[in-house]
Image: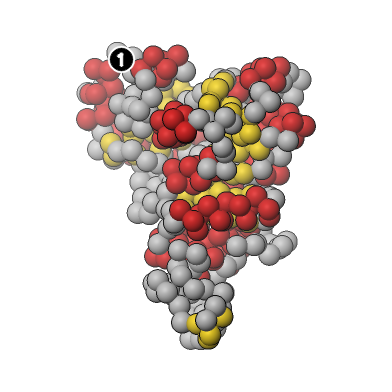
Amino acid sequence: MTAPHSPQGFSTRAIHVGQDPDPVTGAVMPPVVLSTTYAQNAPGETKAGYDYTRAGNPNRDALEAVLASLEGGARAICFGSGCAAMTALFQTLRPGDHVVASEDVYGGTYRILEQVMAPMGVETTWMDFTQVTPGNTDALEAALRPNTKIVLIETPSNPLLKLVDIAAVASVTKARGIVLAADNTFATPYLQRPLDLGVDVVVHSVTKYLNGHSDVLGGALVVKDPELGEKLHFIQKAIGAVPSPMDCYTVARGLKTLAVRMERHCSTTASLAQWLQQHPKITHVNYPGLQSHPQHALAQQQMQSPRGTPLAGGMVSFVVDGGTPAVTRVLQAVRVFTLAESLGGVESLICHPATMTHATIPKEVRQANGISDGLIRASVGLEDLQDLQTDLDLALNA
């Protein structure tokens, strides 16, 4: 759905875009429209543009409108999961096409490209995008081919929290006419606006921070170009990978508190990361907000709240001294953190990427990319900082 131009602030748009009171009853919260089909005035003549809910639904339109507004896009297209959204993007490709992708990505993205798209004739080159800077784009230039159609970046990356200089990558893809896609799940539009930096497609797992409550599965693509948006909308309608009306309603409700949630996620995680860095049982901490992070300066520049304040997100990963046995003890000893996959909810989650979120990636590839067996990833929730520190300290010393 097209988002209206608005000079209003982020939180105001998150609360109001697509959320007008119901014109029939005056209900402040728009109703959930569960109908799968819609009465027509005459054959082919719909009452309000709706005929079948796979093709369109008022709750999905409302969610797409607010997502487009928050990302600064012309159109958002919502799907039943983040993986469905990513797959729809790749369904714009044809056999023989080529993709260049960040080597440090979510395991599900790796699985789609290597186990779904590769058998269909789409080849992927994996590269370290931290090599690409405004003054040196040679590594990216070398990875591109005449048949490269999509460049996919994930920043911050999952699970090592590496950053990609979005504008530097966009300077290359724009010159070549290549679609640049960025997974913005970790940062959210509250911290990072990839479309403003030259990206063509923003990818989200709305399951995570956008919904924020670990109770909805969903995905989204947001684009600047209406023509590309129409192509992706056709794929959405044709394959039917759409979210339910109730899921759309729930995510739209979650978005209303995105700004205040992200502020708290970021402040708590920054403090927790500093504490972890000093812990004797931790050998390394990955968090862009730390001055020790190799791309801290880029984080300060590229990841900022609408207030202009640098914020580094709510995800942190760290390496425990002692390898897999130590990791197992820690993950079984936590009580405030929950051992589970996923991220971005109000509750703190903790996981072992090597055996959970990234288990689908071959071990030799994981280790080459820096995902060691001693790595733990934490999604820091909204609990009190002291309780989270105490929980980790007790678990680390268990």
Note whether residue 211 is visible: no
The percent position of residue 335, horizontal first and vertical second, equals 25, 38
> Looking at the image, which residue is at 76% across and 20% down?
135
| Quadrant including the C terminus | top left
Q: Which kind of residue does numbered mark 1 sit on?
A: Gly
Asked which quadrant contains residue 177, the reply is top right
373 versus 88 height, above or below: above
Q: In the rendered image of this protein, does residue 273 appear above or below residue 85?
A: above
Q: How many numbered badges does the structure rendering display?
A: 1
177 or 394, which lies in front?
A: 177
Q: From the viewer's side, name the closer residue of 398 and 337.
A: 337
Look at 42% across and 17% down and name the residue there: 365
Relative vertical location of residue 60 with respect to residue 315 in this rendering, above or below? below
Which element type, helix, strand or loop, lies under badge 1? Answer: helix
Q: Mark 1 points at which residue?
A: 323
Q: Where is residue 308 in the image (x, y as percent from the top left)?
A: 68, 44
Q: Residue at point 50% right, 30% down? A: 121
Q: Is residue 164 visible?
A: yes
Q: Residues within 10 Å of mark 1 (few under 14, many from 20)?
A: few
Q: In which quarter of the image is residue 191?
A: top right
